[in-house]
Structures are given as C-alpha cells and as structure tokens.
Amino acid sequence: MRKFRAVAFAALVGMALTHGQVWAQDGDDDDAAAGAASSPKAEKATRASKDVPELILGSKEDQFTANQKDFKLIAGQGYRWKITAAGGLEYKFHTDLFRNVWNNQIVINDLEVHMNGAPAWLEFDADGTIQVQFTTVRPGIYTWSVPDLADKGMKGTITIK
C-alpha cells in the first residue's frame, strides 16, 4: 500500500509540474506574436458536424469531370460529405481517407449503414447520392479517385490539418 501511495504521489507531482510548464508557455507573448504574424488563426474543431462541399462525379455534359478536386478538413471535427454520381456511368469511388477517420454512418436514400470499420469503396451503379458521416482523427494528405477514370482527371486530395 505504501508503494502505491508513493507512486500515486509521484504521478500527481509530475502532472502538476507538467501543467505548470504548459501554463508558463501559454502566457509567453513572444511566441503568440510570432505565430500571429506568420499565419492566420487556425480553425478549431467544434462539437457540431460540418458539411464538406458536395463532390459530384460526372455530369450530363461531361461524364469524366468532378466539380471539386481538393478538400481541406481539420482534425477532430465531425463531417457530413455528400458524394453524388451524375454522369450516367458506373463510378467506383475510392479513398484512403476512410481508413484514417472514425466512420459514423453511410446514408443512402435515408437508409443508414453503420459499420465497425471502414468501407473499401463506394460504388455507384446508377446516378444518386451517398452521404458519409465521419470524424477526422489523423492529420495528413489523403487521395480520392475513381480508379478506372483517374487518368481522365477523376482524382484529388483531402487534407486534414
């Protein structure tokens, strides 16, 4: 019991000392002024989910177009992302993002799919919309593509900061 108390006391003192150093750093005006001058204020994660701009694959005029190529997200934020096929082709949407987020659900025609893991890809056999709900957990640059059509420009990036 004495060893437990000694270890618990040592852990408590260590945490107190660590927090004291962090607080000292927080009040340092020199670092704050340098950071503010070099970059704009970083966006912070919120508790409410945000919408990612809809990704539309193809159109009636051009089956091999995407309305947006690159997306910027922040770590720790919940998101809703609508991905729509509109070009009349079969699109197989693939991204390494799904392996690096916490997947909440996939919604298709108001039907929800809840998973215990990430989907390998989303396949559109006909025009329609799939909404993916997830929370970003790992910063990085991820890619998305329609693998068979990537050479025609159906690819892009998803950056999580």
Image (tube, rainbow, N blue to C red):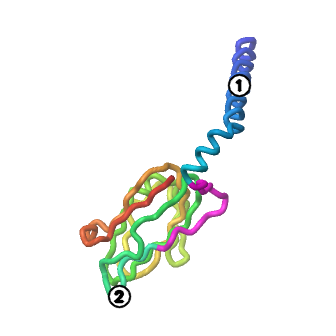
Residue 137, percent across and down?
Answer: 53, 50
- In three-dimensional space, the C-alpha distance between marks 2 and 1, rounded to whole angstroms, equals 63 Å
| Frontmost residue, 112 versus 92 | 92
* Amino acid type, label 2: Lys
| Frontmost residue, 29 versus 5 | 29
Q: Residue at position x 33%, y 77% from top?
A: 65
Task: Give the tally of numbered discs.
Answer: 2
Q: Which mark is residue 48?
A: none
On screen, residue 57 versus residue 72, left or right, reads left
Q: Residue at position x 33%, y 84% from top?
A: 88
- Element on which disc 1 rests: helix
Residue 23: image quadrant is top right
| Frontmost residue, 21 versus 140 | 21
Q: Main secondary structure of the magenta part?
A: loop
Residue 112, percent across and down?
Answer: 54, 69
Q: Residue at position x 59%, y 66% from top?
A: 50
* Amino acid type, label 1: Leu
Crowding around mark 1 (Cα neighbors within 10 Å: few <14, some 14 to 19, many 20+) is few
Residue 67: image quadrant is bottom left
Residue that carries the numbered disc 2 in the rendered image: 60
On screen, residue 161 versus residue 3, left or right, reads left
Residue that carries the numbered disc 1 in the rendered image: 17
Residue 25 versus residue 116 in the image, above or below: above
Q: Residue at position x 62%, y 64% from top?
A: 49
Magenta span contains residue 45: yes
Residue 45, percent across and down?
Answer: 62, 56
In the picture as drawn, the residue positioned furthest to the top comes out as: 2
Please state the extent of the stretch shown in magenta in the rendering: 40-54
